[in-house]
Amino acid sequence: MPEIKGKLGIDEFYKVIFKDEPISIDQAVFDTVQESFDFLKEFSKNKVIYGVNTGFGPMAQYKIKDSERIQLQYNLIRSHASGTGQPIAPKYVKSAMLARLNTLSLGHSGVNKSVIEVMTSLINKDIIPLIYEHGGVGASGDLVQLAHLALVLIGEGEVFYKGERTGTKEVFEKEGITPIAVEIREGLALINGTSVMTGIGVVNTIYTRRLLEWMIACSSAINEIMEAYDDHLSFELNLTKKHQGQREIARSMRSHLRDSSLTRKREHHLYTNNDGVKVFEEKVQEYYSIRCVPQILGPVLDTLNDVERVMIEEVNSANDNPIIDLKKKHVYHGGNFHGDYVSLEMDKLKIVVTKMSMLAERQLNYLMNSKLNDILPPFVNLGELGLNFGMQGVQFTATSTTAENQMLSNPMYVHSIPNNNDNQDIVSMGTNAALITKRVIENAYEVMAIEMITIVQAIEYLKVQDKVSSKTKMMYDAVRKIVPPFKEDLVMYPFVNEVKNYIINHENK
Protein backbone atom coordinates (compact mmCIF):
# COMPACT_ATOMS: atom_id res chain seq x y z
CA MET A 1 0.00 0.00 0.00
CA PRO A 2 1.55 3.34 -1.05
CA GLU A 3 2.01 5.68 1.92
CA ILE A 4 1.88 9.45 1.63
CA LYS A 5 4.97 10.87 3.31
CA GLY A 6 5.42 13.98 1.19
CA LYS A 7 7.39 12.18 -1.51
CA LEU A 8 5.91 10.19 -4.38
CA GLY A 9 7.46 8.52 -7.41
CA ILE A 10 6.18 7.03 -10.64
CA ASP A 11 5.80 3.62 -9.00
CA GLU A 12 3.38 4.97 -6.41
CA PHE A 13 1.33 6.70 -9.08
CA TYR A 14 1.24 3.51 -11.13
CA LYS A 15 0.02 1.46 -8.17
CA VAL A 16 -2.72 3.92 -7.22
CA ILE A 17 -3.87 4.98 -10.70
CA PHE A 18 -3.42 1.80 -12.73
CA LYS A 19 -3.73 -0.89 -10.05
CA ASP A 20 -6.28 0.87 -7.78
CA GLU A 21 -4.19 0.25 -4.69
CA PRO A 22 -5.35 2.24 -1.63
CA ILE A 23 -3.15 4.81 0.05
CA SER A 24 -2.38 5.51 3.69
CA ILE A 25 -1.16 8.69 5.35
CA ASP A 26 1.91 8.69 7.55
CA GLN A 27 1.20 10.15 11.00
CA ALA A 28 4.07 12.59 10.50
CA VAL A 29 2.06 14.14 7.64
CA PHE A 30 -0.90 14.82 9.92
CA ASP A 31 1.45 16.30 12.52
CA THR A 32 3.09 18.59 9.97
CA VAL A 33 -0.23 19.69 8.47
CA GLN A 34 -1.63 20.44 11.92
CA GLU A 35 1.47 22.42 12.89
CA SER A 36 1.28 24.41 9.65
CA PHE A 37 -2.42 25.13 10.20
CA ASP A 38 -1.90 26.23 13.79
CA PHE A 39 1.02 28.45 12.83
CA LEU A 40 -0.89 30.20 10.03
CA LYS A 41 -3.89 30.76 12.26
CA GLU A 42 -1.75 32.55 14.82
CA PHE A 43 0.63 34.27 12.38
CA SER A 44 -2.16 35.79 10.28
CA LYS A 45 -3.54 37.79 13.20
CA ASN A 46 -2.99 41.52 12.62
CA LYS A 47 -1.12 40.84 9.35
CA VAL A 48 -2.10 41.12 5.71
CA ILE A 49 -1.84 37.61 4.27
CA TYR A 50 -2.98 37.11 0.69
CA GLY A 51 -6.03 34.92 0.44
CA VAL A 52 -6.57 34.83 4.19
CA ASN A 53 -7.83 38.34 4.80
CA THR A 54 -7.62 39.83 1.30
CA GLY A 55 -9.43 39.33 -1.95
CA PHE A 56 -7.84 37.34 -4.76
CA GLY A 57 -5.79 38.25 -7.83
CA PRO A 58 -6.27 41.89 -8.79
CA MET A 59 -8.84 42.11 -5.97
CA ALA A 60 -6.13 41.53 -3.36
CA GLN A 61 -6.14 45.24 -2.53
CA TYR A 62 -9.46 44.76 -0.75
CA LYS A 63 -9.27 43.73 2.90
CA ILE A 64 -11.77 41.13 4.04
CA LYS A 65 -13.55 41.37 7.39
CA ASP A 66 -12.79 38.63 9.88
CA SER A 67 -16.46 37.68 9.91
CA GLU A 68 -16.40 37.07 6.13
CA ARG A 69 -13.14 35.16 5.78
CA ILE A 70 -14.78 31.73 5.65
CA GLN A 71 -17.36 32.90 3.14
CA LEU A 72 -14.50 34.25 1.01
CA GLN A 73 -13.12 30.71 0.59
CA TYR A 74 -16.51 29.29 -0.42
CA ASN A 75 -17.04 32.17 -2.85
CA LEU A 76 -13.68 31.46 -4.47
CA ILE A 77 -14.40 27.77 -4.97
CA ARG A 78 -17.91 28.23 -6.31
CA SER A 79 -17.10 31.12 -8.65
CA HIS A 80 -14.09 29.39 -10.19
CA ALA A 81 -15.78 26.02 -10.77
CA SER A 82 -16.47 27.25 -14.30
CA GLY A 83 -14.95 24.64 -16.60
CA THR A 84 -16.46 23.59 -19.92
CA GLY A 85 -15.89 21.03 -22.65
CA GLN A 86 -15.48 17.31 -22.08
CA PRO A 87 -14.95 15.81 -18.62
CA ILE A 88 -11.36 14.79 -17.98
CA ALA A 89 -11.17 10.98 -17.87
CA PRO A 90 -11.29 9.57 -14.31
CA LYS A 91 -7.81 8.03 -14.45
CA TYR A 92 -6.26 11.46 -15.03
CA VAL A 93 -8.40 13.14 -12.37
CA LYS A 94 -7.41 10.51 -9.83
CA SER A 95 -3.77 11.21 -10.65
CA ALA A 96 -4.41 14.94 -10.16
CA MET A 97 -6.00 14.22 -6.79
CA LEU A 98 -2.99 12.21 -5.70
CA ALA A 99 -0.66 14.99 -6.83
CA ARG A 100 -2.71 17.61 -4.94
CA LEU A 101 -2.88 15.50 -1.81
CA ASN A 102 0.87 15.06 -1.86
CA THR A 103 1.70 18.74 -2.19
CA LEU A 104 -0.75 19.70 0.58
CA SER A 105 0.88 17.03 2.76
CA LEU A 106 4.16 18.94 2.67
CA GLY A 107 2.80 21.42 5.23
CA HIS A 108 3.44 24.58 3.21
CA SER A 109 -0.22 25.44 2.62
CA GLY A 110 -1.84 25.83 6.05
CA VAL A 111 -4.86 23.62 5.41
CA ASN A 112 -6.52 21.70 8.21
CA LYS A 113 -6.22 17.93 8.40
CA SER A 114 -9.80 17.31 7.21
CA VAL A 115 -8.57 18.16 3.69
CA ILE A 116 -6.06 15.31 3.86
CA GLU A 117 -8.63 12.92 5.29
CA VAL A 118 -11.38 13.61 2.75
CA MET A 119 -9.04 13.54 -0.25
CA THR A 120 -7.68 10.20 0.95
CA SER A 121 -11.21 8.83 1.22
CA LEU A 122 -12.07 9.96 -2.30
CA ILE A 123 -8.98 8.28 -3.73
CA ASN A 124 -9.46 5.04 -1.80
CA LYS A 125 -13.17 4.82 -2.55
CA ASP A 126 -12.61 5.72 -6.21
CA ILE A 127 -14.91 8.73 -6.03
CA ILE A 128 -13.75 10.92 -8.90
CA PRO A 129 -14.69 14.62 -9.10
CA LEU A 130 -16.16 15.92 -12.34
CA ILE A 131 -13.48 18.19 -13.81
CA TYR A 132 -13.77 19.68 -17.28
CA GLU A 133 -10.98 19.96 -19.85
CA HIS A 134 -11.43 23.64 -20.63
CA GLY A 135 -10.71 26.44 -18.20
CA GLY A 136 -7.10 26.43 -17.05
CA VAL A 137 -4.48 28.92 -18.22
CA GLY A 138 -1.87 27.45 -15.88
CA ALA A 139 -0.75 30.69 -14.25
CA SER A 140 -2.11 30.54 -10.71
CA GLY A 141 -1.98 26.89 -11.59
CA ASP A 142 -5.12 24.99 -12.50
CA LEU A 143 -7.53 27.41 -10.83
CA VAL A 144 -10.65 26.35 -12.71
CA GLN A 145 -10.00 22.61 -12.79
CA LEU A 146 -8.90 22.47 -9.16
CA ALA A 147 -11.97 24.49 -8.18
CA HIS A 148 -14.07 21.56 -9.42
CA LEU A 149 -12.06 19.28 -7.12
CA ALA A 150 -12.51 21.72 -4.23
CA LEU A 151 -16.23 21.91 -4.98
CA VAL A 152 -16.50 18.19 -4.35
CA LEU A 153 -14.45 18.43 -1.16
CA ILE A 154 -16.97 20.92 0.29
CA GLY A 155 -19.73 18.45 -0.59
CA GLU A 156 -21.00 20.12 -3.74
CA GLY A 157 -20.68 19.54 -7.48
CA GLU A 158 -20.67 16.15 -9.18
CA VAL A 159 -18.58 12.99 -9.14
CA PHE A 160 -18.13 9.77 -11.06
CA TYR A 161 -19.01 6.92 -8.71
CA LYS A 162 -19.26 3.26 -9.69
CA GLY A 163 -19.39 4.22 -13.35
CA GLU A 164 -22.16 6.78 -12.92
CA ARG A 165 -22.07 10.57 -12.88
CA THR A 166 -24.00 11.71 -9.82
CA GLY A 167 -24.28 14.45 -7.21
CA THR A 168 -21.55 14.69 -4.59
CA LYS A 169 -23.97 15.13 -1.69
CA GLU A 170 -25.71 11.85 -2.46
CA VAL A 171 -22.42 9.92 -2.68
CA PHE A 172 -21.05 11.48 0.52
CA GLU A 173 -24.19 10.46 2.40
CA LYS A 174 -23.98 6.93 1.02
CA GLU A 175 -20.29 6.56 1.91
CA GLY A 176 -20.47 8.41 5.22
CA ILE A 177 -18.05 11.17 4.14
CA THR A 178 -18.21 14.57 5.85
CA PRO A 179 -17.15 17.54 3.67
CA ILE A 180 -13.93 19.32 4.61
CA ALA A 181 -13.91 22.03 7.24
CA VAL A 182 -13.13 25.44 5.75
CA GLU A 183 -11.31 27.47 8.39
CA ILE A 184 -8.52 29.73 7.10
CA ARG A 185 -7.52 29.41 3.46
CA GLU A 186 -8.65 25.95 2.36
CA GLY A 187 -10.30 27.35 -0.78
CA LEU A 188 -7.21 29.09 -2.08
CA ALA A 189 -4.85 26.30 -1.01
CA LEU A 190 -6.91 23.76 -2.92
CA ILE A 191 -7.20 25.62 -6.22
CA ASN A 192 -3.82 27.39 -6.33
CA GLY A 193 -1.37 24.95 -7.90
CA THR A 194 -0.26 22.77 -10.78
CA SER A 195 -1.71 19.44 -9.69
CA VAL A 196 -4.12 18.82 -12.57
CA MET A 197 -1.58 19.48 -15.31
CA THR A 198 0.99 17.49 -13.33
CA GLY A 199 -1.36 14.60 -12.64
CA ILE A 200 -2.23 14.37 -16.32
CA GLY A 201 1.46 14.72 -17.13
CA VAL A 202 2.43 11.78 -14.93
CA VAL A 203 -0.14 9.52 -16.62
CA ASN A 204 1.11 10.78 -19.99
CA THR A 205 4.64 9.66 -19.15
CA ILE A 206 3.43 6.19 -18.11
CA TYR A 207 1.50 5.73 -21.35
CA THR A 208 4.40 7.11 -23.40
CA ARG A 209 6.86 4.63 -21.90
CA ARG A 210 4.46 1.81 -22.76
CA LEU A 211 4.07 3.19 -26.28
CA LEU A 212 7.84 3.34 -26.69
CA GLU A 213 8.15 -0.33 -25.73
CA TRP A 214 5.60 -1.28 -28.39
CA MET A 215 7.42 0.92 -30.90
CA ILE A 216 10.65 -0.97 -30.15
CA ALA A 217 8.77 -4.25 -30.65
CA CYS A 218 7.35 -3.17 -34.01
CA SER A 219 10.69 -1.82 -35.21
CA SER A 220 12.41 -5.05 -34.23
CA ALA A 221 9.77 -7.15 -36.02
CA ILE A 222 10.21 -5.15 -39.23
CA ASN A 223 13.94 -5.85 -39.08
CA GLU A 224 13.02 -9.53 -39.05
CA ILE A 225 10.44 -9.31 -41.82
CA MET A 226 12.95 -7.58 -44.08
CA GLU A 227 15.82 -9.85 -42.97
CA ALA A 228 17.82 -6.73 -42.24
CA TYR A 229 21.53 -6.70 -41.53
CA ASP A 230 21.99 -6.27 -37.79
CA ASP A 231 25.09 -4.09 -37.62
CA HIS A 232 23.06 -0.88 -37.30
CA LEU A 233 21.99 -2.23 -33.90
CA SER A 234 25.46 -3.35 -32.86
CA PHE A 235 27.00 -2.37 -29.53
CA GLU A 236 30.12 -1.20 -31.33
CA LEU A 237 28.38 1.17 -33.75
CA ASN A 238 26.10 2.71 -31.13
CA LEU A 239 28.94 3.09 -28.65
CA THR A 240 30.49 5.65 -31.00
CA LYS A 241 27.53 7.93 -30.27
CA LYS A 242 27.55 9.36 -26.73
CA HIS A 243 23.78 9.52 -26.20
CA GLN A 244 22.47 7.10 -23.57
CA GLY A 245 19.02 6.90 -25.15
CA GLN A 246 20.38 5.68 -28.47
CA ARG A 247 22.54 3.07 -26.79
CA GLU A 248 19.61 1.83 -24.70
CA ILE A 249 17.27 1.55 -27.70
CA ALA A 250 19.88 -0.42 -29.63
CA ARG A 251 20.46 -2.68 -26.63
CA SER A 252 16.72 -3.25 -26.24
CA MET A 253 16.34 -4.15 -29.91
CA ARG A 254 19.29 -6.54 -29.75
CA SER A 255 17.61 -8.19 -26.77
CA HIS A 256 14.32 -8.40 -28.65
CA LEU A 257 16.02 -10.04 -31.64
CA ARG A 258 18.50 -12.28 -29.81
CA ASP A 259 16.75 -15.54 -30.79
CA SER A 260 15.55 -14.51 -34.23
CA SER A 261 16.70 -16.57 -37.18
CA LEU A 262 15.80 -13.89 -39.73
CA THR A 263 18.16 -10.94 -39.17
CA ARG A 264 21.48 -11.31 -40.96
CA LYS A 265 25.18 -10.65 -40.45
CA ARG A 266 26.65 -8.35 -43.05
CA GLU A 267 29.92 -10.27 -43.02
CA HIS A 268 28.11 -13.40 -44.18
CA HIS A 269 26.72 -11.74 -47.31
CA LEU A 270 28.40 -8.52 -48.37
CA TYR A 271 31.92 -8.80 -47.00
CA THR A 272 32.87 -11.88 -49.03
CA ASN A 273 32.46 -13.36 -52.53
CA ASN A 274 31.43 -10.17 -54.34
CA ASP A 275 34.10 -10.15 -57.07
CA GLY A 276 32.67 -9.21 -60.44
CA VAL A 277 29.31 -8.01 -59.12
CA LYS A 278 28.30 -4.68 -60.67
CA VAL A 279 24.75 -4.32 -59.34
CA PHE A 280 23.58 -5.76 -56.05
CA GLU A 281 20.09 -7.20 -56.24
CA GLU A 282 19.44 -6.64 -52.56
CA LYS A 283 19.77 -3.28 -50.83
CA VAL A 284 23.15 -2.72 -49.26
CA GLN A 285 21.55 -0.63 -46.52
CA GLU A 286 17.98 -0.49 -45.25
CA TYR A 287 15.71 2.53 -45.41
CA TYR A 288 16.09 5.01 -42.57
CA SER A 289 12.84 3.96 -40.86
CA ILE A 290 14.52 0.57 -40.31
CA ARG A 291 18.20 1.43 -40.05
CA CYS A 292 18.01 4.61 -37.94
CA VAL A 293 15.61 3.47 -35.21
CA PRO A 294 18.16 3.87 -32.35
CA GLN A 295 18.95 7.39 -33.53
CA ILE A 296 15.22 8.24 -33.82
CA LEU A 297 13.94 6.60 -30.65
CA GLY A 298 17.03 7.48 -28.58
CA PRO A 299 15.99 11.15 -28.24
CA VAL A 300 12.47 9.97 -27.44
CA LEU A 301 13.75 7.91 -24.51
CA ASP A 302 16.09 10.64 -23.24
CA THR A 303 13.29 13.21 -23.43
CA LEU A 304 10.82 10.91 -21.71
CA ASN A 305 13.24 10.34 -18.84
CA ASP A 306 13.72 14.09 -18.44
CA VAL A 307 9.97 14.77 -18.56
CA GLU A 308 9.31 12.10 -15.96
CA ARG A 309 11.95 13.60 -13.66
CA VAL A 310 10.42 17.08 -13.91
CA MET A 311 6.89 15.75 -13.32
CA ILE A 312 7.99 13.99 -10.14
CA GLU A 313 9.88 17.07 -8.97
CA GLU A 314 6.69 19.08 -9.46
CA VAL A 315 4.58 16.48 -7.65
CA ASN A 316 6.88 16.71 -4.64
CA SER A 317 7.03 20.51 -4.66
CA ALA A 318 4.99 23.15 -2.89
CA ASN A 319 3.06 24.78 -5.75
CA ASP A 320 0.84 27.08 -3.72
CA ASN A 321 0.86 30.77 -2.79
CA PRO A 322 1.64 32.03 -0.25
CA ILE A 323 4.09 29.47 1.12
CA ILE A 324 4.35 28.69 4.82
CA ASP A 325 7.82 27.95 6.19
CA LEU A 326 7.56 26.29 9.57
CA LYS A 327 11.31 26.33 10.18
CA LYS A 328 11.61 30.06 9.58
CA LYS A 329 8.19 30.75 11.10
CA HIS A 330 7.33 32.96 8.18
CA VAL A 331 4.95 33.27 5.22
CA TYR A 332 6.37 34.04 1.78
CA HIS A 333 4.41 35.39 -1.19
CA GLY A 334 5.46 34.38 -4.70
CA GLY A 335 4.52 32.37 -7.76
CA ASN A 336 5.12 28.66 -7.14
CA PHE A 337 1.74 27.97 -8.72
CA HIS A 338 3.00 28.90 -12.19
CA GLY A 339 2.92 25.95 -14.59
CA ASP A 340 5.79 26.69 -16.98
CA TYR A 341 7.83 23.67 -15.95
CA VAL A 342 4.96 21.33 -16.75
CA SER A 343 3.91 23.17 -19.90
CA LEU A 344 7.37 23.02 -21.46
CA GLU A 345 7.83 19.34 -20.59
CA MET A 346 4.43 18.40 -22.01
CA ASP A 347 5.32 20.19 -25.25
CA LYS A 348 8.57 18.23 -25.40
CA LEU A 349 6.72 14.99 -24.75
CA LYS A 350 4.11 15.52 -27.44
CA ILE A 351 6.84 16.33 -29.97
CA VAL A 352 8.64 13.03 -29.36
CA VAL A 353 5.37 11.08 -29.33
CA THR A 354 4.49 12.67 -32.66
CA LYS A 355 7.88 11.56 -33.97
CA MET A 356 7.06 8.02 -32.85
CA SER A 357 3.77 8.13 -34.74
CA MET A 358 5.68 9.40 -37.79
CA LEU A 359 8.14 6.52 -37.53
CA ALA A 360 5.29 4.02 -37.20
CA GLU A 361 3.55 5.54 -40.23
CA ARG A 362 6.73 5.35 -42.35
CA GLN A 363 7.37 1.75 -41.33
CA LEU A 364 3.76 0.98 -42.18
CA ASN A 365 4.18 2.60 -45.58
CA TYR A 366 7.28 0.51 -46.18
CA LEU A 367 5.29 -2.65 -45.54
CA MET A 368 2.41 -1.46 -47.73
CA ASN A 369 4.50 -0.45 -50.75
CA SER A 370 5.63 -3.56 -52.63
CA LYS A 371 8.02 -1.47 -54.71
CA LEU A 372 9.90 -0.50 -51.57
CA ASN A 373 10.06 -3.84 -49.78
CA ASP A 374 10.17 -6.20 -52.78
CA ILE A 375 8.86 -9.16 -50.76
CA LEU A 376 5.24 -8.39 -49.85
CA PRO A 377 2.16 -7.90 -52.02
CA PRO A 378 0.73 -4.36 -52.26
CA PHE A 379 -0.96 -3.33 -48.99
CA VAL A 380 0.04 -6.70 -47.54
CA ASN A 381 -2.98 -8.08 -49.36
CA LEU A 382 -3.29 -11.80 -48.70
CA GLY A 383 -6.30 -12.06 -50.99
CA GLU A 384 -6.74 -11.56 -54.75
CA LEU A 385 -5.01 -8.45 -56.02
CA GLY A 386 -7.52 -6.07 -57.56
CA LEU A 387 -10.52 -7.75 -55.99
CA ASN A 388 -9.34 -7.48 -52.38
CA PHE A 389 -7.75 -4.53 -50.59
CA GLY A 390 -5.80 -5.92 -47.64
CA MET A 391 -4.63 -3.11 -45.36
CA GLN A 392 -5.18 -0.36 -47.94
CA GLY A 393 -8.11 1.28 -46.14
CA VAL A 394 -6.53 1.55 -42.71
CA GLN A 395 -3.40 3.19 -44.11
CA PHE A 396 -5.50 6.29 -44.75
CA THR A 397 -6.43 6.35 -41.07
CA ALA A 398 -2.82 6.03 -39.98
CA THR A 399 -1.70 8.80 -42.31
CA SER A 400 -4.54 11.11 -41.28
CA THR A 401 -3.95 10.53 -37.57
CA THR A 402 -0.21 11.12 -37.93
CA ALA A 403 -0.93 14.40 -39.71
CA GLU A 404 -3.16 15.46 -36.82
CA ASN A 405 -0.33 14.72 -34.40
CA GLN A 406 2.04 16.84 -36.44
CA MET A 407 -0.36 19.77 -36.15
CA LEU A 408 -1.02 19.19 -32.44
CA SER A 409 2.69 19.05 -31.62
CA ASN A 410 3.00 22.82 -31.98
CA PRO A 411 3.87 24.27 -28.55
CA MET A 412 1.42 25.65 -26.00
CA TYR A 413 4.30 26.94 -23.87
CA VAL A 414 4.61 30.10 -25.99
CA HIS A 415 0.86 30.74 -26.32
CA SER A 416 0.50 33.08 -23.37
CA ILE A 417 -2.58 35.35 -23.36
CA PRO A 418 -2.77 37.91 -20.52
CA ASN A 419 -5.96 37.82 -18.46
CA ASN A 420 -7.31 38.46 -14.95
CA ASN A 421 -7.15 42.26 -15.43
CA ASP A 422 -3.56 41.71 -16.58
CA ASN A 423 -2.61 40.42 -13.14
CA GLN A 424 -1.79 37.14 -14.89
CA ASP A 425 0.10 38.89 -17.65
CA ILE A 426 2.15 35.87 -18.71
CA VAL A 427 0.71 32.37 -18.33
CA SER A 428 1.83 28.79 -18.98
CA MET A 429 -1.18 27.10 -20.63
CA GLY A 430 0.18 24.00 -18.89
CA THR A 431 -3.17 22.25 -18.55
CA ASN A 432 -3.87 22.69 -22.24
CA ALA A 433 -0.38 21.38 -23.01
CA ALA A 434 -0.95 18.28 -20.86
CA LEU A 435 -4.38 17.56 -22.36
CA ILE A 436 -3.18 18.00 -25.95
CA THR A 437 -0.27 15.68 -25.18
CA LYS A 438 -2.80 13.14 -23.88
CA ARG A 439 -4.60 13.32 -27.24
CA VAL A 440 -1.34 12.97 -29.19
CA ILE A 441 -0.47 9.85 -27.18
CA GLU A 442 -3.89 8.31 -27.83
CA ASN A 443 -3.52 9.07 -31.55
CA ALA A 444 -0.10 7.43 -31.60
CA TYR A 445 -1.58 4.24 -30.16
CA GLU A 446 -4.04 4.17 -33.06
CA VAL A 447 -1.24 4.42 -35.63
CA MET A 448 0.72 1.76 -33.75
CA ALA A 449 -2.27 -0.60 -33.71
CA ILE A 450 -2.58 -0.34 -37.50
CA GLU A 451 1.13 -0.97 -37.94
CA MET A 452 0.99 -3.97 -35.61
CA ILE A 453 -1.88 -5.63 -37.49
CA THR A 454 0.04 -5.09 -40.73
CA ILE A 455 3.21 -6.62 -39.27
CA VAL A 456 1.25 -9.71 -38.24
CA GLN A 457 -0.31 -10.00 -41.70
CA ALA A 458 3.18 -9.74 -43.22
CA ILE A 459 4.46 -12.54 -40.98
CA GLU A 460 1.42 -14.56 -42.05
CA TYR A 461 2.14 -14.00 -45.74
CA LEU A 462 5.83 -14.90 -45.42
CA LYS A 463 5.04 -17.91 -43.21
CA VAL A 464 7.88 -17.08 -40.83
CA GLN A 465 6.01 -17.55 -37.54
CA ASP A 466 8.59 -20.15 -36.48
CA LYS A 467 11.56 -17.97 -37.47
CA VAL A 468 10.77 -14.69 -35.74
CA SER A 469 12.10 -13.98 -32.27
CA SER A 470 10.21 -15.23 -29.25
CA LYS A 471 9.23 -11.66 -28.38
CA THR A 472 7.88 -11.00 -31.86
CA LYS A 473 6.01 -14.31 -31.67
CA MET A 474 4.38 -13.15 -28.44
CA MET A 475 3.25 -9.95 -30.15
CA TYR A 476 2.02 -11.99 -33.14
CA ASP A 477 0.01 -14.31 -30.89
CA ALA A 478 -1.52 -11.41 -28.94
CA VAL A 479 -2.72 -9.69 -32.12
CA ARG A 480 -3.93 -12.96 -33.62
CA LYS A 481 -6.23 -13.47 -30.62
CA ILE A 482 -7.93 -10.24 -31.69
CA VAL A 483 -7.53 -10.24 -35.48
CA PRO A 484 -7.82 -13.54 -37.35
CA PRO A 485 -5.73 -14.09 -40.51
CA PHE A 486 -7.78 -12.69 -43.36
CA LYS A 487 -7.75 -12.81 -47.14
CA GLU A 488 -11.29 -11.61 -47.72
CA ASP A 489 -11.92 -7.97 -46.84
CA LEU A 490 -13.19 -7.26 -43.34
CA VAL A 491 -14.69 -4.27 -41.58
CA MET A 492 -11.49 -3.12 -39.91
CA TYR A 493 -12.43 -0.49 -37.36
CA PRO A 494 -13.44 -2.92 -34.56
CA PHE A 495 -10.11 -4.75 -34.92
CA VAL A 496 -8.06 -1.54 -34.91
CA ASN A 497 -9.85 -0.32 -31.80
CA GLU A 498 -9.44 -3.65 -30.03
CA VAL A 499 -5.72 -3.81 -30.77
CA LYS A 500 -5.35 -0.21 -29.65
CA ASN A 501 -7.12 -1.01 -26.38
CA TYR A 502 -4.93 -4.06 -25.92
CA ILE A 503 -1.60 -2.27 -26.35
CA ILE A 504 -2.62 0.78 -24.31
CA ASN A 505 -3.63 -1.47 -21.43
CA HIS A 506 -0.79 -4.01 -21.54
CA GLU A 507 2.93 -3.78 -20.99
CA ASN A 508 5.18 -5.23 -23.67
CA LYS A 509 7.20 -7.62 -21.52
Image (cartoon, rainbow, N blue to C red):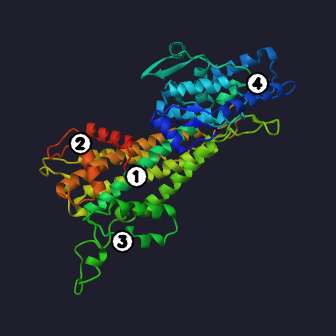
Disc 3, disc 4: CB below 8 Å? no
Kind of residue at disc 4? Gly
| Picture coordinates of residue 296, whole percent (x, y) | 44, 60
Task: Please indicate whether residue 385 sits to the left or right of residue 320 in the image.
Answer: left
Q: Which mark is residue 231?
A: 3
Q: Which badge, 3 or 2, is on the more N-terminal residue? A: 3
Going by the numbered disc 1, the residue's amino acid type is: Glu
Give the label, 2 or 4, closer to the camera.
2
**Local secondary structure at mark 4:** loop
Q: Amino acid under label 2?
A: Lys
Query: Looking at the rendered structure, which numbered label has been put on residue 481?
Result: 2
The residue positioned 61% from the left and 17% from the top of the image is 179
Of label 2 and label 4, which has the lower sequence position?
A: 4
Q: What residue is shown with label 1?
A: 213
**SS under mark 1:** helix
**Taking 474 as reference, is 244 above or below it?**
below
Residue 318's x, y, as percent?
A: 68, 39
Q: Earlier in the sequence, mark 1 or mark 2?
A: 1
Position of 175 with respect to 33 (left or right) is: left
Query: What element does badge 2 sit on?
Result: loop
In this view, the residue in front, 380 or 393, is 380
